Amino acid sequence: MRTIRLGGYVIPAGALVLLSPYLTHRHPAVWDDPERFDPDRFIAARAATRSAFAYFPFGGGPRRCIGSAFATTEMQMIVATVAQHYRLSVATRRPRPPRPRAHAAAKLPSLRPDLGR
Amino acid sequence: MPAAATRGAPPGPAGFPVVGVFPWRVAIRSAFSRNACAATATSWPCDSALIASICSAIPITSSTCSRTTRRAYAKGPTVSRVRPLFGESLTMVDGERWRGRRRHVQPAFQPGLHGRFASVVLRAVAELLDRWRLAGRARRARGAGRRDAAAHPDHHHPGLLREHLLGELQALGQALDAAVTHVDRRLWSPLGWLDVPSPASARYRRALGEVEAFTCSPDGRGTPLRAAARHDAGRPPRGHRASHRSRASRRAQGISLRRTHDHGERAGLGLVRALGASGGAGADRGGMPRRPGRPQPSPGGSTQARPHAPRDRGDAAPLPAHVAHRPLAR
């Protein structure tokens, strides 16, 4: 185990590195207008221009989620089926920021959408 | 990274998102994530670090850590709180044992098998939409407005998938919900590491016992309860071998099952549990109207066995044989 320099930062040996997909997926240095709903940003031509780890909801490397391909297929099927039967609309314009849940005992924060409850 | 960085001076290239540097064993303030998200280019210096922790949103960091750091996902102490539920399954182990588990379950996730699962997903979605439709009618009858799906996540879909894969197992759904709820509560409780006898822990252990009994069933999908119901109804159990009949009979008489120590079974158990992590009984409690012709749940949440009636699948495609009749993780 040794100290390394990564992305301009010195990571000391033994440091705990937390990877935050939430932040990466919304960071303006990685995405243009990250908060805008723009499904076209995932078309192959545009996806090829950015790092594979700009979008990593299932992690990556050998520990990548084993069900990632299945989950993606399932989500596409669900969205397609629901969209065939329902017209979805935005229920409220109120922002729904993530609500962190963290505690000393749990060590790590977890983000969940604030559903106003 | 120097842990004693000056507050307000990010310890890296300006504008890049190191958002948190904090000692591992110091309580993380509840506003940490909110602040981090609001200001993704700020640092969170700490005065003294036992172990430096770095929260990064830089893709290259994610890439390097995920691909080259073998211990990037080393299990922390929190794992002990979920181990009784997930056992020694894929998400719970490390090193060679993890590699073994991963190899074991990998075939079940091959892309070529997704198509065989498609009909299950589509039928579950169709049923979910049926429930939405009925709920919409009820809301309109009451003069209520549109239904906010995001504000009422009812987790029906996992429960429906579980039903379509494994059958309508109300008791198993209730057991899974009880177990997962208990574990979730312990995860977020400051005293969650304490394992003291209490009514809640007793309920949790009972629920685990029911789940364990299900996963020990001989055909990988029948339940002791269902087997007991068949036994009570005078019908032979699903299994044709004498050992199956013997085991079903013992279960019907309340004799406890063996605990499985087979790695494959244990690994598969994680998948079954994940499928049932929420839904089922929880869906019943959500007040959603059930499809006509389907039995209503008993008011007291009874776990009494009842005969398994064949599901009305209409003109749906037959359940994929691979998914329906074989252990999921083989």
Image (cartoon, coloured by chain):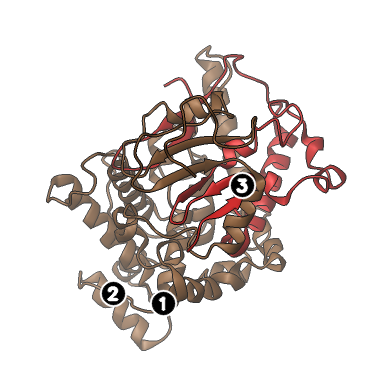
In the rendered image, what is the letter of the chain coloured brown?
A: B
**Hey, what amino acid is under mark 3?**
Pro
Q: Mark 1 points at which residue?
A: B263
Identify the residue shown where x is 72% and y is 51%.
A52
**Above or below, A101 relative to B295:** above
User: Which chain letter matches label 1?
Assistant: B
Mark 2, Cα crowd under 10 Å, few <14 / some 14-19 / many 20+, is few
Mark 3, Cα crowd under 10 Å, few <14 / some 14-19 / many 20+, is some
Marks 3 and 2 in Cβ contact (< 8 Å): no
Identify the residue shown where x is 51% and y is 29%.
B36
Q: Position of residue B295 (x, y in %)?
A: 42, 45
User: Mark 2 against mark 1, which lies toward the viewer?
Assistant: 1
Q: Name the residue under label 2.
A: B259
**Above or below, A109 relative to B158:** above
Give the secondary structure at mark 2.
loop
**Hey, what amino acid is under mark 2?**
Arg
Q: Residue B199 carries which label?
A: none
Rendered image quadrant of residue B192: top left
Q: Which residue lies furthest to the top in this view?
A: B143
Q: Mark 3 points at which residue?
A: A57
Give the secondary structure at mark 1.
helix
